[in-house]
Amino acid sequence: MGKDLLTFTSKGIYCPRGDFFIDPHKPVHRAVVTHAHSDHARWGHKYYMAQQRNRHILKLRLGDIKLELKGYGEVTMINGVKMSFHSAAHVWGSSQVRVEYKGEVWVVSGDYKLEDDGFSGSFEPVKCNTFITECTFGLPIFKWRPQDNVYRDINDWWRRNSENAKTSILTAYAFGKAQRLIQNIDHSIGNVYVHKSIENVNNALIQDGAVLPEVFCTDPSIKKTDYHGSLVITPGYSFENTWLSAFHPCEVATVSGWIQVKGIKKKRRLGQGFVLSDHADWAGLNEAVRMTGADRVFVMHGYTDVYARWLRERGYRAAVVESLRIRE
Amino acid sequence: MRNFSNLLLDLENAADTSVKIDLLVSYFRSVDNSDKISTITIFTKKRPKRQVKARVLTEWAIEESGIQRWLFDECYNVVGDFSETISLILADHSNDTGRSLTYWIRYLQNLEGKDEYEKKLAVLEAWRQLDSQSILIFNKLITGGFRVNVTKNLIIRALASLTGKDQSEIAYRLMADWDPDSSDLGSVFNSEDAPENISAPYPFCQAYPLTGNPSNLGKIDDWVAEWKWDGIRVQLIKRKGRLFIWSKEDLVTDKFPELHSLAQHLPDGVAIDGELLPFKDGHPLPSSILRNRIKSKNVTKKMLKEAPAVIKAYDLLELDHRDIRDTGLVDRRTKLEELVNSILDQDLLQYSHNVRVRSWKDLDSLRKKSRTRLVEGLVLKHKKSAYHSDAKRGEWWKWNADPFSIHVVLMYVQIGRGQRIHSYTDYTFGVRDGNDLVPIAKVVARINDNEIWEINSFIEKNTLERFGPTRAIKPELVFELHFRGVQPSGRHKSGILLLDPEIYRWCREKKVQEVNLLTDLKQLIQSNG
């Protein structure tokens, strides 16, 4: 392990030679962050480094941090190790992290998808010797339909509700899925409203250079009837509180990859929904691994044991990150 | 098939009945007659026969998809359903060929009698022509595992709304012995052109559970009280010289040869509502015996000897080929009694006598002793009541004996089946026996999702041991169980068997020291002989 360029510690992925962490989950001195989702960009590190598009979104999420920004493909030397960000197409500004020392290259995928959603950039395959990949949806039961088909279904659903003077409510992550929807749905059907938390993310992303179609923010002063026929995007709601009652009559649907499997849908109480994910599906994972040309693959997040075994059976040297973590 | 699979998806998500009915009505409007019939056929449980076992289907899917067995198994562990796993693995999102539900049902029927290789080729061909949702339905149909959360009553209401006919008429037509292959919607629903169906029963009139005090019903003199026999509700019909016995689900005439001689004694054109009971030496036996008989393929001499069936007659629906359901109850019961008395085999067909008392209070004390008579309780029927299709509030009430109740502690849990594979919903409860705990009942939890959620998080934190899918957990959660009865049992560690146990409530305030003792249950057996 000692001579590996990246190692797995209880604080996260660590580069001993460069003395920095990638997406660490406990406070460290120097953190390289792949994207601004809270399970990757955590609070409490001394110095942060991220891709250029993340300035305001990271500030929104983490407050005032010591942050250094780099463009896609821009090489930074950290204690003699070459580090660079490459588009991961997961959300706005999401990156894979490439690390090189003496000709040996490792890539940390962060979260990614291969499909270009028109907002989050297009995935850049990066050649490497060792690839550390997520595998959230690492089972062959996860196969995404082409996204245009899903948008069409969502538009049809919205149009139908609109014709019945109902409000359509979509629950989706505030950062990522929400913008992807705003970008791709048919705004000619009606007004699009977003929950305040999504509005905040949108404003941060616009300051970071994003361009988004115009949307309205929900507000208690808006009359119920004004929402009828509209689409409301919200990160979630609670049945106990009265938030939802402001939109009656309404139809609620969730946008998530987990909707694919009935049992999971039920367990997570997702109800009606549309299958759309910002993560790679089974074919996407395999394609990404193939394109890196790596012969060694570490997998993390999701169905790791299964995916690692699958890769091993196909000739890769593959292992699960979590099982390799060094206890300190 | 696309319409049908969309309908099922929408029904899955629909919260209330009126939405479900709207969905069904607009679905029926959007498909042609043959698909209407196919849909009704599937929903009213006249499903196509199983052509291929799930295990065999899985082998073919593994071969077709090119993935390994272990990977399929991993997927199954996540999905929890073979048909769905296969549909997800094979989905390629290319366009469905758009063939109708009826087409695919005929396709399946054509597999009858084919050898396995021919079946395989046909199934692979079908999979290539269907999208993921439709593959799921196809797989469910071919393996005979199709279950859908649509009650017959819902279908009846939707069809009544669609055709503008009475629900009772639709119900009557649906119960009949119609052939999905030879009839179209017209002949099922238009009495004019319907081929005469001599076996058709009437929809069963149901009693509402009585909650609260019966004195709210008014004078006892306006009511008839009958014992609620613990058997299988049936209609006994004789038309054109032939005898038919219908349970609420199915025609079961063949399973009860001991009753066939009634055909010679009953006049033609009668329909009697009653209860099928195993009856020996003047006493009823547990009704499960007859349920098992209905399930078994052949009726053996042993079955007939050990638990012969009789019918306790409650009501008369048809006399001299005339539907008399609208005449008052007292009139119908009088005619019924005359009819029963006039035939010779009165042992096979017995009139279920009125329970005569002067006051509600007296009736209540009889009800409380129901169990000693091996009946479930009482049914109260208004003297003027008609025999309604289904249930009508206010005219028939069932007043059951109180269930037994005990406090038990949760000892073992197991992952649920099918859709419940993701949470622990099979619970084994125990009672105290000295310083130990003894398991006495395993129950599938029918409590609300929030409680299951909470209990599952308790399980995560309090697991003592694991054996495969089962976990032993810290005995801390106390529940109140209700059950219908208790029997001695040699097959159970506790030595007893609870009948129809169900969770009544989760008693958060109670501690494990407060659960019942095994001896409490043993005493119950003695006192209820």
Image: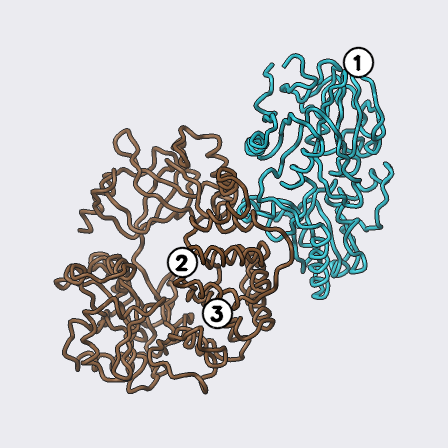
x, y percentage for residue B173? Answer: 42, 77
Tell me the distance, in whole angstroms, between the alpha carbons under discs 3 and 1: 73 Å
Decide if residue A59 is on the left or right side of residue B421: right
Q: Amino acid at mark 2?
A: Asp
Please report, as a chain letter, where disc 1 is located.
Answer: A
Say if B177 sits above or below B416 in the image.
below
Residue behind mark 1: A79
Colour of chain A in the image: cyan
Q: Kindly state the secondary structure of the residue where label 3 is placed.
A: helix
Residue neighbourhood size for the residue with mark 2, other residues' Cα within 10 Å, grouped as few (<14), some (14–19), many (≥20): few
Say yes or no: labels 3 and 2 on the same chain.
yes
Residue A100 lies in quadrant: top right
- As rendered, which of B115 and B307 lies closer to the eye? B115
Residue neighbourhood size for the residue with mark 1, other residues' Cα within 10 Å, grouped as few (<14), some (14–19), many (≥20): few
Q: Quadrant of the N terminus of chain B?
A: bottom right
**Residue at image point 49% right, 59% down:** B122
Mark closer to the chain start, 3 or 2 = 3
Decide if residue B511 is on the left or right side of residue A186: left
Tell me the distance, in whole angstroms, between the alpha carbons under discs 3 and 2: 29 Å
- As rendered, which of A105 and A260 lies closer to the eye? A105
Decide if residue B321 is on the left or right side of residue B277: right
3 and 1 marks in contact (CB < 8 Å): no
Please report, as a chain letter, where disc 3 is located.
Answer: B
Q: Kindly state the secondary structure of the residue where label 1 is placed.
A: loop
x, y percentage for residue A258? Answer: 61, 44
Colour of chain B in the image: brown
Residue behind mark 3: B40
Tell me the distance, in whole angstroms, between the alpha carbons under discs 1 and 2: 70 Å
**Residue at image point 41% right, 41% down:** B507
Say if B326 sits above or below B418 in the image.
below
Please report, as a chain letter, where disc 2 is located.
Answer: B
